[in-house]
Image (tube, helix red, strand yellow):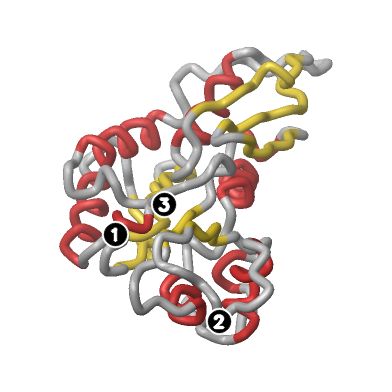
Amino acid sequence: MWPFGKSAEARLQQALKENQVLGRYPLEAKVVKKVAIFSGELPNEHLKSLLEVVAGGINGIESADTSAVRVVAPVAAEPEPATDPLALARAALAKIKADPDLAGNPVDVVQQGEKIILRGAVDAEAEREKARSLAASVPGVAEVDVSGLQVISGAAELNVTDEDGDVVYTVKAGDTLSAIALHYYGSAGRGAYMKIANANGLADPNKIYVGQKLKIPGTVAGPDEELA
């Protein structure tokens, strides 16, 4: 289940790869203490600011560090874009974060040309439609893809992240590890709940207690990975 089935770092790397401007360059990205740290090479200084926009659209990331990105002009220097290639993403993200019903939900905002992609979770179908409408209202947006935006009851309450930008869940009365896995990964199978158990050093997956904080690890493949 997106975004719970994929780490903040993996979602950032995917967004970078999918970006029509930045995806052409040799760049690497990792997340440390909610900071997106980029390295690699770009042909001009302006493109560094686009990295910050991409990072800002990923839930669980609070800032970006581009100090390790070198500006190396190619033989035929590429001109700086006349307009901001990620202006639509900036505007869509601002609208969603400003809305009181959506601000606390785990939502990623990604731009591909004139298309805005929303991924994550909201509390109700009405919020899903509101997110779509807000993104579509940005001048210049030709399409909004919400196929990766799920409706999960209490989504905002699940949006608690650790220093890696990944989800942390506080155990409540009546919880079981398999039920927690089902809520986050869409599977209550052993592969799913043992992923949580192993990430938290639980010798016995049947022994959790009220108030315990559990890291919900992302997977490399994300929501499509087999967790049965």
Nearest to N terminus: mark 3 or mark 2: 3
- Tell me the element at label 3: strand
Q: Which residue is mark 1?
A: 122
The CA span between labels 1 and 2 is: 29 Å
Q: Which residue is mark 3?
A: 117
Between residues 215 and 126, which one lies in front from this camera angle? 215
Q: How far across and how far down the image is residue 95, in percent?
A: 24, 37
Mark 1 is on which residue type?
A: Val
The CA span between labels 1 and 3 is: 14 Å
Residue at the image point whose x is 34% and y is 37% from the top = 93
Give the foreground label among 1 and 3: 1
Q: How far across and how far down the image is residue 16, in percent?
A: 61, 41
Between residues 182 and 57, which one lies in front from this camera angle? 182
The CA span between labels 3 and 2 is: 38 Å
Mark 3 is on which residue type?
A: Ile
Q: How far across and how far down the image is residue 191, in percent?
A: 64, 81
Nearest to N terminus: mark 1 or mark 2: 1
Q: Is residue 116 above or below residue 46?
A: below
Whether residue 86 sits left or right of residue 141 in the image: it is right
Q: Which residue is mark 2?
A: 206
Q: Quadrant of residue 198?
A: bottom right
Whether residue 165 sits left or right of residue 92 in the image: it is right
- Tell me the element at label 1: strand
Q: Residues within 10 Å of mark 1 (few under 14, many from 20)?
A: many
